[in-house]
Structures are given as structure tokens and as C-alpha cells.
Amino acid sequence: MYDFTADPAQAKPDLYRDLLGAADALTQGEPDAVANMANVAALIWQLVPDLNWAGFYRMVEGGLVLGPFCGKPACIRIAVGQGVCGAAAESGQTQLVEDVHAFPGHIACDAESRSELVVPVVRDGAVIAVIDLDSPVKGRFDAEDQAGVEALATLLSSRI
Ligand code: SME
């Protein structure tokens, strides 16, 4: 049994340090990418407050395909360059979107989403997946969330 509990009073850098440690412990030595993405999606969902979707899209034959996640059922395939996830996959750069309604081409999988953070997972110079966090709160994500999820993406680059 794994029991990771969130502390609502915790500062974000501490929260992401705990998240990274838990993700490291859960994925270390496990070669199955699906199992690792599933556990990390569940960890994000459990530890990061104010989310309505958290999970992965994987790069498969030149396009993004839905991976393990928590939240409502979502769009299955996203073209590179399309929406926030596709922009992250195309540029290799994190996309921090304060207001999804102001992002041209945003794909509304869940009408509740107001802000979004998408971080590419890069291996050998290529984007192999993106980590996508959605929130119903406008402006939910900041530089500390970005740094925390980017550290997670670095950890996972050789484990998914
Ligand atoms: N909003 C994303 C699509 C994925 S869902 O949020 C799960 C986008 O614009 O790429």
C-alpha cells in the first residue's frame, strides 16, 4: 500500500519536492511506462490542489495520443501544433496558460478548465510525451508549479 497525503498548508516548493520524491520512489526500477505514468498521474491528482485533470499525452507516430490520467475522459488524439499540448510538443517548451479562453486553439476537453500547465518530457532531444495539468481556477499555475512539473518531467524522461 502507498499512502501519500497532501498538506494544504505546504508551500509549493515543498509540495513539489515531496511529489518528486514520491514519483522517484514509485517509478524507480520499474520498466513499464504505462504503470509509471498511471502512478504519477494519480500522485499529481492526490498531491496538487485545485485540478480538474492531470495526466499524459504520448508522442506516437508523430502525434499526441492520450495516456494515463485522472479526470474526465479527454480528447484521444491531438496533432502537434494544435492546442496547448500540441504547442508544448511542437516547441519543446512549457506552456503556462493563465486563461485558456485567451489561448488561440485551446482544446476544451473539459469545459470547467480555466488555466493549464503543459510540460514536455524530452529524451535524447525529442519530445516523447507531455504532462498536462488543468485547473478550474483562472491563473492557478505560476513559476513554482512550472519548476516543479519540469523537475518531474526530467525525472520521468528515462522512465516512461
Ligand atoms: N486543453 C488541452 C487538451 C487536453 S485536455 O485539457 C485534457 C489542449 O488545448 O491541448
Image (cartoon, grey):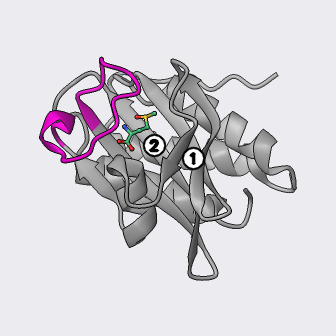
The three-letter amino acid code for the residue at tag 1 is: Tyr
On the image, which quarter does residue 110 sit in?
A: top left
On the image, which quarter does residue 111 sit in?
A: top left
Of the pair 42 and 85, the residue shown nearer to us? 85
- Let me know if residue 155 is in the magenta part: no
Mark 2 packing: few (<14 Cα in 10 Å), some, or many (20+)?
many
Label ID, residue 132 = 2
> For disc 1, does the CB lie below 8 Å from ligand 1?
yes
Looking at the rendering, in which quadrant would you find the C terminus?
bottom right
Query: If you read the primary sequence from the N terminus, does the residue marked by circle 2 or circle 1 appear first?
Result: 1
Of the pair 115 and 62, the residue shown nearer to us? 62
Q: Residue at x 69, y 43 (%)?
A: 37
Of the pair 120 and 111, the residue shown nearer to us? 111
On the image, which quarter does residue 157 sit in?
A: bottom right
Compared across the picture, whether 26 is left or right of 152 comes to: right
Q: Residue 44: image x %, image y %?
A: 53, 34
Determine whether the residue tagged by mark 1 lies in a helix, strand or loop: strand
Compared across the picture, whether 136 is left or right of 130 comes to: left
Q: Residue at x 86, y 50 (%)?
A: 32
Q: Mark 1 sits on what residue?
A: 57
The answer to whether 156 is drawn above or below residue 106 in the figure is: below
Span of residues in magenta: 98-115
Q: Are marks 2 and 1 in contact (CB under 8 Å)?
A: yes
Q: Residue 35: image x %, image y %?
A: 80, 40
Q: Residue 123: image x %, image y %?
A: 63, 74
Determine whether the residue tagged by mark 2 lies in a helix, strand or loop: strand
